[in-house]
Amino acid sequence: MMDNSGGGFWSLALAMLLAFAFNLSAPAAGPQSGSYGVSRPMEQAMRLYHEGQDNEAMDRFMDILTRGTPSERSLANEYVTKITLRMNTGLDTPKDKGSDAGALSDVEEVRKEPGKRQTPSQERERVSDSEEAEMAAADAKVSRKEMVSEKIAAKIAEMRRSILLELGRSDAVKIYMGDSLPKAITINTSAFFAREAVFKPGVTPLLSGLAGLMFTMGKADCLILPEGSARNDVKIKSIRQALALNSYLISRGISPARIEVNLTGSDVKLPKELTNIGGLIMIFSYDNAPRLKEREDFPTKGPRISLGIYPTALSMRADEGAIVEFSVFEPPTGTPSWKFQIFEVRKDNNILLLQAISGIGAQYNQSFWNGRKNFFGAPYPSGKYMFSLTAADVEGKETTVQRTLVIRPTPEEEKASRAGLLSAAAVKAKELKSRAETKAGTSGKPPLKTGKALLKKGSSARKPALFTAGKYGQKKKTGLSPAKNKRAAAPQTNPDEAASVADSARGPRQASVTVADSPPKAEQDRVIAQATGDGENQIPFSGQVSYKIYFKENSATITANSEKKLSQVAETLNYYPISTVKLTGYAYSGEPNAEAMAENRVNYVVARLSKKYKIDKNRLDAQTKVSETPKTLVEIKLAGQE
């Protein structure tokens, strides 16, 4: 009896001791073990993480990933994932209950009072209070994250609805919905393609809409079927068109892991919502994971990567945001490492690093960037922002891709910028005036001369006077009698109005030609008009007249006022049949496919002038330009002489 009871007693004591030892060692078992069983560099990195110094913590964790022990590398990789999520959303991961922060706080509290010992009851009470505080903080974090997620989901859903409505207005695109999400799309290839695999200039808004729709659909993948594949009637032309659409979507930054082209249409299950199999078909699936494993035979100089942003311009006033998607493929040579960075591009073209995340292995990531620090923080200033993704394989071969996003200036910033331009224009005009007066004083000649140009006898049509370059670049008329020359009473800004007034005053046998104002004033008008963006008035300067035809943002659709202005332009061009006409199509660098957008706009104006208003197309010299400031227009310049 004694032996048995004694054995039971020692067994019970041993069990209690083991349980107590297990409880003491339990914190070191989890990934968020705080300062238990970790090296000093790891402890410092964890402390920086909990203090919110993500960039410094990221650098230390990345150093541990390359130099630490296997257990530390695993823990560091988890913290890298946490920092990645927090940089994208401004919040910790749901699994982060703050145990590390609590452990660090406890250590600091003990250090403050090293000589004071707490009773077991006080210790239990303190631990209980600490756990309650941690649970409350964790609940607050989770609820805040849920609120952010709901807000982001609502914004993306609104973006998707807007795109679907815009695409639905076109007869060239048919959308087949299911469970409030698109299941398939059919495309009229004759409306999209000019010849074989060449897109028509006017379909850029539709292409941009298709790309934007895919950005708003998360990880959903897209299967592209050439026209006729569903009927087993595929032609080479249809295959090229399907490949052209695939190339466009990838060029916009959509991950190739989400897009597949089935050139034959075999072994494809069509969704029940697809009721018409005519045209090029896009089928969407929401269950498949992105395919991030690269083929063995895929030639590469580094890991295959992708980076896309939609939209590429934001308005902070409208509380807009952009979807950022990137992917890193796993090459046959081994596991890749990658780094994603966001830079602010300053006015002097210097770049400032704002955020950086990195990781190891194949990766697909889609996040929402609203141009604010930690999502709820202060907005970043207006300007250009560069997004960069770099990946390297085990052999050190790297690939890099970059995209640009623009934060549009606020009305207050636009007003301040306009005021600065006007001030600069005033200074420049003053300098020109002083220079002109000095030059006129030394030559002893008046700066301007004007007169009348007479039509040939018996001619009923207006003909322009011939111009030669005069002093300071102003327009002069040749073949006029000196006795008829007079000083100009006032500058005239509209040449067609000037001609009509002259006709009514002098009869059908005479016409007058407006001469430019004095060189300093004309230059001032030109600079100020360019600074304020006033495109509704014709601006004469240095022998030229300038018109601006405005377009809606992110499209080649002309505004209603500019459509009326275009008819006035055509009327003016008829007054000057031998003058050259230079058209420059502009697009904002923040617009999708800015080069193509600028070309579409200028092509539209050329087509309207030549087809509707019968302007000789050989007179129209078209070119394009991408502007670093918001500029969605076509500028028409009428030179004084061919």
Image (cartoon, rainbow, N blue to C red):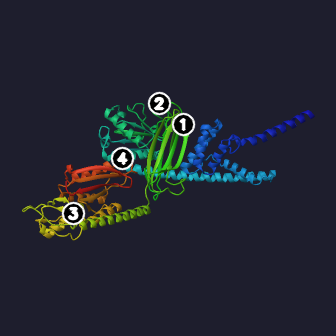
Which label's residue is closer to the chain start, 3 or 2?
Answer: 2
- Residues at marks 1 and 4, CA–CA distance in whole angstroms: 35 Å
- Residues at marks 1 and 2, CA–CA distance in whole angstroms: 16 Å
Q: Amino acid at mark 2?
A: Arg
Q: Could you say which disc has been placed on residue 361 in the image?
A: 1
Identity of the residue drawn at 19% across and 70% down? 487
Which label's residue is closer to the chain start, 3 or 1?
Answer: 1
Q: Which residue is mark 4?
A: 206
Q: Is residue 276 above or below residue 118?
A: above
Q: Position of residue 162 (x, y in %)?
A: 42, 52
> Does dot 3 land on a helix, a strand or a loop?
helix
Within 10 Å of disc 4 (Cα), the crowding (few <14, some 14-19, many 20+) is: some
Which label's residue is closer to the chain start, 1 or 2?
Answer: 2
Q: Which residue is mark 2?
A: 295
Q: Are the residues flagged by discs 4 and 2 in contact, CB closer than 8 Å?
A: no
Which label's residue is closer to the chain start, 3 or 4?
Answer: 4
Identity of the residue drawn at 81% across and 52% down? 119
